[in-house]
Image: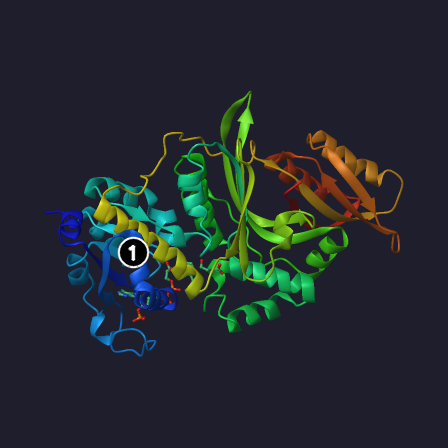
Amino acid sequence: MSTSDTARADGVVRIALIGCGTVGSQVVRLLTEHGEDWAARSGAQLELVGIAVRDAAAERDPWVPRELLTEDVSGLIERTDVVVELIGGIEPARTLVLEALRGGRTVVTGNKALLAAHGPEVHAAVESGDADLYYEAAVAGAIPVVYGLRESLAGDNVVTVAGIVNGTTNYILDEMTMRGLSFDDALAQAQQLGYAEADPSSDIDGHDAAAKAAILASLAFHTRVGIDDVPVTGIRDVTVEDVTQARENGYVMKLLAVARRTPRRGRPAGIAVRVHPALVPETHPLAAVHGPFNAVVVEAESAGRLMFYGQGAGGVPTASAVLSDIVAAAGHAIRGGHAPRESTYAQLPLLGPEATPARTRVQISLADQPGTLAAVAGIYGEENVSIESVHQQRSDEGVARITITSHVATEAALERTVARLVAERSVEDVVSVSRVEGE
Ligand code: NDP
Ligand code: HSE
């Protein structure tokens, strides 16, 4: 008898919760407080059979039933239909998720690191166990963007996904932009407020956003994208001067996850997936995303532009996404039906720097003498990068500050241009190089 047969026989869906931390504890509370509603919506009686943790004796929130706590994770999984994995990280989450799926159990997870690093193995386990996998909480917390791409846009062709998918970095950049805080002070505040991890490098170096970008790109373009396919630049080197100058020029600095399908002669040539800080015009919807909030803008051929906005982190908002998956999983267990399977039929090539479109805004200090600007413009021209605008500030002791914004070129051509600017004799310094998105 499969797990769904058991559930269908008695109408009870047995749930194992693995992990009872920031998110897991809120899942327990919401299941306890609103279980009757979730049951009515799914058509199943939801029974939380056990809660696996590392230390069953540790203090817990008052609503966590102590008698359900266990350190025997595998034993708990054996007794259940739906396994909710909220441990995070790769191991032992990977082993437990694979074990549950291969055993035909439904898995609900918020683990973007696991999905982005071991997606093929996890999806193969879904197939081999004829199981179901739900992961709404893995990208942008409460925001239903996984559902949006996986189900709502299944009848459309996505062209671009661009989003702020890490709350910690958005909080830091926003504090730097709006209140002039230094990077270190803004980070310390983010840690005090509980947005950043104790070791915040996965947030500020962009790896958390890269995992989410890989998941979003896989869903949007029906192509397998893993975290190693996503070039990443974090926000460690962004200075207050960078964000202040950007603002004075009508831009806001954001850490963006961008996945873009590039057409060639009417057909998709491939996709480029990147995470990097970028200047967005202050009129763009992503510029208005403040504090720890997340937002994802999706452009699709028929639907046009869609924007998903909300709380991308935190125990309660993320638990909302987990609960929606539990209700869907329970409904399928009782009434039949499945979560959508992984869709990779398009398998578009991943584009390298020579084929990836990009724009930059470069600030240089330049000797204020005849012909020096022409030399700089010559480098742009020789690298086939078209200049959109040039702005020269009043020169100071014979050195002019020049800001050059390009039209769209390739990443590789822009990188070569900067390398040549660094080597150019009349250029005293390449002060900053920023990507520009959203125009
Ligand atoms: P926490 O670190 O707060 O909680 C982790 C839980 O897992 C703890 O209860 C811990 O037990 C338990 N655990 C760790 N190792 C084991 C193990 N070997 N066996 C059994 N239990 C174990 O994590 P979060 O709640 O913050 O995150 C959970 C997941 O949700 C992660 O994948 C995360 O990326 C994702 N997520 C989190 C968001 C957030 O805002 N926090 C937002 C979106 C997604 P113990 O309590 O005994 O230490
Ligand atoms: N640390 C993440 C963030 C939350 O700051 O958005 C979990 O994905």
Does residue 110 appear anywhere in the picture?
no
Name the residue: 71% across, 30% down: 382
Q: x and y percent of residue 348 in the render? A: 44, 30
Quickly name the residue at label 1: 40
The type of residue carrying mark 1 is Ala
Q: Quadrant of residue 423?
A: top right
Front one among 307 and 386: 307
Please give left or right for residue 376 compared with residue 313 in the image: right
User: Which residue is more in the foreground, 29 or 56?
Assistant: 29
Of the 4 image quadrants, the one containing the C terminus is: top right
Mark yes or no: residue 415 visible.
Answer: yes
Residue 314 as seen in the image, left or right of residue 276? left
| Res 14 → quadrant | bottom left
Report x, y in % for residue 263.
Answer: 54, 27
The residue nearer to you, when weighing 115 against 422, is 115
Please name the colour scheme applied to the rendered image.
rainbow
Residue 315 on image: x %, y %: 42, 65
**Residue 399: x and y, percent?**
84, 51
- Give me the residue at 75% from left, 36% from top: 388
Extreme-left residue of the structure: 1
Is 375 left, or right, of 158 in this rendering? right
